Amino acid sequence: MPKRDTAQRRHAILAYVNAHGETPVEVLASRFAISEVTVRKDLSTLESSGLLLRRYGGAAPLPQEMLAEPAQVLSPHKRAIARAARARIREHNRIIVDSGTTTAALIGELGGLRGLVVMTNSLAVAGALRELEPEPALLMTGGTWDPHSESFQGQVAEQVLRAYDFDQLFVGADGIDIDRGTTTYNELFGLTRVMAEVAREVVVMVEADKLGRRIPNLELPWARIDTLVTDWRLEAADAAAIEGQGVTLVVADAPQ
């Protein structure tokens, strides 16, 4: 069966389970006219992508608290940053997209890129990736669900990441400390550092109004950051300071 048909069937199975709740394998096999062996393979793939939960003899939807919030209207700054970051991605790249609203904005710009492999710890990012054409190969970290960051974290996620290598990491930040690097309110930042370890280029996507936020938790020091993509509101002094850290600075243009 062609890959696209398989993907469409899995999308349909996911929609059915989400609509009907916990569903036995035999019901899905009858509904989609496939063998129970195929159903189990589809359910395993959907579970490994963080899209549903396996149950004995079937599958169930994710609990409501694990589902991403409804999509928010993106600011023009986030959209511009996403477009500028997209320009750095080539077909067949292997990338990591960390959780966050700015990084999630990147997904809508990836349509048309062929051969992408995308790892993420975010259900929102995973869901958006499944809507792309062509659909990238999706990998998920798994791990422990953190409701604060709405992402998977922890040692299991770190172990999964260390089994791969990637061309690029796209990561956001709660703040940028000009002297130190990216900062965060979340104390669970170990996974981000592992993401940076396994990527050849670390790309920080952050709106200019976060420059100068001296939040106590240092997430990535400047030495671990290759590129910073921000918007046109960046002040000249901050731009010079960032470039002085040896970081490639990309400033997204204002919409016309």
Image (cartoon, grey):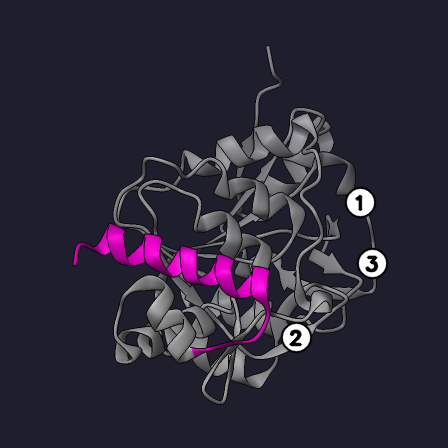
- In the figure, is residue 208 to the left or right of 202? right
Q: Closer to us: mark 2 or mark 3?
A: 2
Q: Is residue 11 magenta?
A: yes
Which residue is the site of mark 1? 212
Magenta residues span 1-24
Instruction: From the viewer's side, name the closer residue of 67 and 118.
Output: 67
- Where in the figure is residue 211, as x and y percent of width and height? 75, 42
- In the figure, is residue 77 to the left or right of 196? right
Say which element carries label 3. Answer: loop
- Where in the figure is residue 138, as x and y percent of width and height? 39, 60
Gap in Å between the C-alphas at discs 2 and 3?
A: 24 Å
Q: Residue at x 53, y 70 (%)?
A: 52
Mark 1 surroundings: few (<14), some (14-19) or many (≥20) residues within 10 A: some
Above or below residue 22? Residue 255 is above
Which of the 4 quarters of the picture holds residue 164?
bottom left
Q: Are marks 3 and 1 in contact (CB under 8 Å)?
A: no
Tell which circle, 1 or 2, labels the residue nearer the N-terminal end: 2
Instruction: From the viewer's side, name the closer residue of 244 and 57.
Output: 57
Q: Farthest residue to the bottom: give it.
A: 56
Say the numbered circle drawn on residue 145: 2
Which of the 4 quarters of the picture holds residue 225?
bottom right
Gap in Å between the C-alphas at discs 3 and 1?
A: 9 Å
Q: Residue at x 46, y 35 (%)?
A: 109
Say the numbered circle drawn on residue 92: none
Q: Is residue 8 magenta?
A: yes
Which residue is the site of mark 3? 215
Say which element carries label 1. Answer: loop
